[in-house]
Structures are given as C-alpha cells and as structure tokens.
Image (spheres, helix red, strand yellow):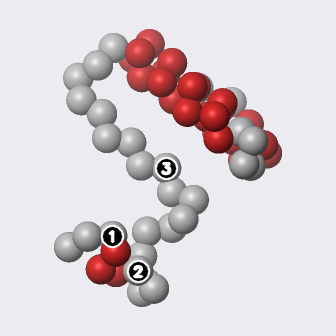
Amino acid sequence: MTHASVQGTALAVPADLVRLSVGVEDLADLRADLLIGLAAAREASPVRVQRMASFL
C-alpha cells in the first residue's frame, strides 16, 4: 500500500505531516539536518515552522 492509494480516504496522510526516517546517526547531525530543513521551510509557513524549531 502506498500513500497515493489511500488519498481522499480516512487513511490519507495529512498534508502537514512531517515524516522522519532515520538510521543510526549522531544526534547532533540529525538535529542540524532538521534545523536546515526547517529554515528552508520557514518562508512557506513561518509560524508553524517556528513552533517546530523551538522543540529542537
């Protein structure tokens, strides 16, 4: 089953979901990568991104 196959149903993945798939990596590297991604997304939705970044 893919995300596309359930689009438009109760099982659909929300558009604002942030999905992380990580392996065995250093926590500092993961945090840095997330902050870079959030900084890039800040232009699209400054308020939501700021709330997410505050948890890091």
Q: CA distance from mark 2 to mark 3?
A: 17 Å
Residue that sits furthest to the right in the current view = 47
**Image coordinates for residue 19, horizontal then vertical, percent:** 42, 49
Q: In the displayed structure, does residue 23 sit left or right of residue 48? A: left
Q: Amino acid at mark 3?
A: Val
- Pointer 2 and pointer 3: residues touching (CB < 8 Å)? no
Task: Classify 53 as above or below 47.
Answer: above
Pair 3/1: label in front: 1
Q: Which residue is mark 2?
A: 7
Which residue is found at the position 48% from the left and 24% from the top? Answer: 33
Q: Amino acid at mark 2?
A: Gln
Badge 2 density bin: few <14, some 14–19, many ≥20, Cα 10 Å? few
Image quarter where the C terminus lies is: top right
**Closer to us: 55 or 14:** 14
Q: In the displayed structure, does residue 45 sit left or right of residue 37? A: right
Q: In the displayed structure, does residue 3 sit left or right of residue 36? A: left
**Image coordinates for residue 11, horizontal then vertical, percent:** 38, 78
**Closer to us: 55 or 1:** 1
Q: Which residue is mark 3?
A: 18
**Image coordinates for residue 46, horizontal then vertical, percent:** 78, 43
Q: Which residue is mark 1?
A: 3
Badge 3 density bin: few <14, some 14–19, many ≥20, Cα 10 Å? few
- Pointer 1 and pointer 2: residues touching (CB < 8 Å)? yes
